[in-house]
Amino acid sequence: MTKETLVVMLFLTVRVCLVGGIFLAYPRITRKGLVFGTYVGESVAEGEEARRIKREWDRGIVMVMVLSLAVGYGISMVGRPVTGNLTGTVVLLGSLPFLYVWVYSQARRLAPPSAARQAEISAAPLSVNDRLGEGLGIFALVVCILTGLAVIAYATIRYGSLPDSVPTLANLFGINEELRDKSLIAILLMPLLSLVVCSGFALMAILIARAKSSVRAGLGGRSVEAQKSFRVLMSQLLSGMALFTCLFASLVSVKIVHAALSPPPFLHLSIGLAAGAMVLFALLSLFQIMTGSGQGGALLEKGSPEAPLTGALADNAHWYLGMMYIDKDDPSILVESRFGLGYTVNYGNRNALLVTIVYAALLLGLLALALVDTLA
Amino acid sequence: MLTLTIDQGLPDPVYEQVAHQIRALIASGALEPGRALPSVRQLAGDLGVSLNTVARAYRLLEAEGFLSIRDRAGVTVAAPAEKLEDSACGPLLVKLRVLLARLRQSGMGTEQLLETLRHEIEVLDSASRGERR
């Protein structure tokens, strides 16, 4: 077995354990009353039938993890580590939607008719100081836009002095592995992608700071405080990701120009450190939210008196597959997710739809340009 | 932490439920003068109702002298002095006199009228403690 095969298998194992672990944790950090994206009420969610569905989910996730590792290892060991890595990941990510739909359809049967009545009740905090985390989001957005534009300007200015071939890929030891014909897209793709992706992270952080509150009625503020705490953590996570990704992508963008002018090495210690810091920050933040707060502050509500969820979270009528929210009468752009971690877009809101389409078009447009440039 | 709860199943329109609860919180002192309230968009988003519903409740409370709506400061609880000087107080007192006259006409004595008023004030105060109607 080659060194490359071992490294690939290690990466696949880490990825499978991380993704599988997160999906195993999701039902345990969701808000009370919700089972796989369906509002079934607090007592039913703690009942035997709900527990049976959760056990099926656990077994399914473990089976998917074992299967993806077996496929990935098998293909890698017959001398095709890159294909093995890819196939293992496809098996993992491709199986999860089927497993989710299976448990969701079972959870849906638990939804009582009283959930519709419960959804008619909604509660909101009478507070104006709940845009916590917005300042950091705005700061991140400004930094990402300014840095992105500066890197684009730098690459454009140096474009004339670059040689006919430019490096676009390097291995872990910093050795150039791919050279491409010089083109504006080859040089500007990374800074443009960075601009779109990082600004997207920062914009999400700002929107989360302003997102709908999904609180319980009559809890004396415990639910509101939990919700605020979760919102701040999510907003900080996305602002941090925007800044770290911006740092990493900007360093890579500048280094592509430098490497083209004076190769090798392509990679630099600073890029490794930035990538490491980005990954570490994301993992630690996720761990903190999942163990300390839970979805929507669910873990912070523990021990508080029972009170049903109100509003969108208790309304099954506007949720599709427990994940997609469509309510044209709701002015919210973002609402709290029912399954997973974070927030989801209200696809019934015209502004939310517009932002999503523009953002997706920008990303797909850039990737299409890169593809056309590569094929040419 | 003060929360607002609406129930779409009640016969009262939603804007009246919003206005009633905010009015009760102001009258009981739970929402003090100068206190800022959420924007129309924020409150409508949190409650999952249309912008017009919250805007209508805020406009009603402004007309009654409970709220002050300014472009920069947003929506705040009106100061007591502002309430006294407000021209909306006159029409409200006229309405109160009409209501008292109708109750008197229905046969209520002074003691019964006072008892009814006392009870309604207690209901108003209980709303600020989060009790549902």
Image: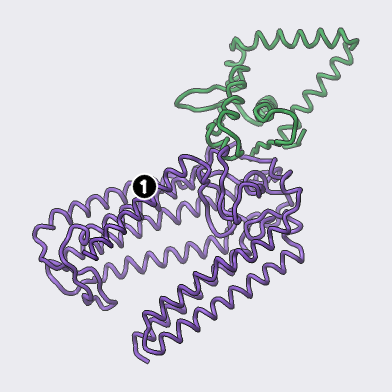
Q: Nearer the viewer, residue B71 or A340?
A: A340
Q: How far across and down, in percent of the image, does residue A133 sit?
A: 46, 47
> Which residue is depicted at the point 26% across and 78% down?
A173
* Residue A140: image location, x then y, percent: 36, 50
Query: If the image is split into quadrants, where does the N terminus of chain A sit?
Result: bottom left
User: Which of A99 and A150 lies nearest the eye of the viewer?
Assistant: A99
Identity of the residue drawn at 63% across and 30% down = B31
Secondary element at image label 1: helix
Q: Is residue A220 above or below residue A53?
A: above
Residue B122 image offset from top left, x and y in percent: 79, 27
Question: Which coloring applies here?
Answer: by chain
Q: Is residue A251 left or right of residue A205?
A: left
> Going 42% across and 85% down the picture, which residue do you hit?
A75
Q: Left of A338 or right of it: where is A106?
A: right
Give the residue number, with chain letter if any, for mark 1. Answer: A139
Residue A191 is situated, as x and y percent measured from the top left of the image, at 26, 57
